[in-house]
Amino acid sequence: MPFTFDAATLRRSLNFTLTTSLGAIDLLGEVAGGGTYDDLVGESESSAIRGATVRRLSLRQLILTKRAAGRPKDLVALGEQAILEERGDRD
């Protein structure tokens, strides 16, 4: 459904799922099982993407929030758990 992506829309909503020319992206103001940005920033890591520094959830926290959300697409994506186990990090 088309909408205007502007400051007013951002103030009215917490979460957005967008399709871009580079692929899908979720912009989340609140994460099920994790909380808000302030709650999760300590569980995030910095990455450089195209010259900009961004924060992203640690793999461990991503797994925990996907489990908490319980959505079918999140549960299917829990292959990240296998990556953690391969690296030797266990929940």
Image (cartoon, grey):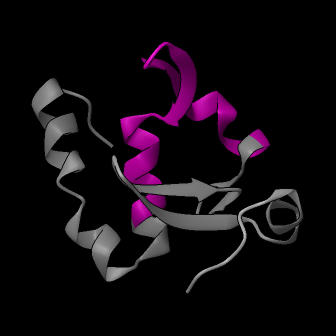
* 58 horizontally vs 81: left or right: right
Tell me if residue 32 can be seen. no
Q: Is residue 44 above or below residue 39?
A: above
44 versus 60 height, above or below: above
Residue 24 location, quadrant:
bottom left
Q: Which one is in front, 5 or 14?
A: 5
Which residue is found at the position 66% from the left and 41% from the top? 40
81 left or right of 14 in image: left
Residue 5 at x, y percent in the picture: 71, 63
In the displayed structure, does residue 54 sit left or right of residue 67?
Answer: right
The location of residue 37, given as percent across then percent down, is: 72, 44
Q: Residue at x 48, y 68 (%)?
A: 68
| Residue located 65% across and 29% down the image | 42
Task: Estimate the x, y position of residue 81 in percent, counting from the top left.
Answer: 22, 48
Magenta stretch holds residue 17: no
Q: Quadrant of the N terminus?
A: bottom right
Q: Provide residue 90's location: percent of width, then percent of height.
A: 26, 37
Name the side, left or right, on which 66 lies relative to 8: left
Extent of the magenta region: 38-66
Placement of the C terminus among the 4 image quadrants: top left
* Residue 30 visible somewhere in the drawing: yes
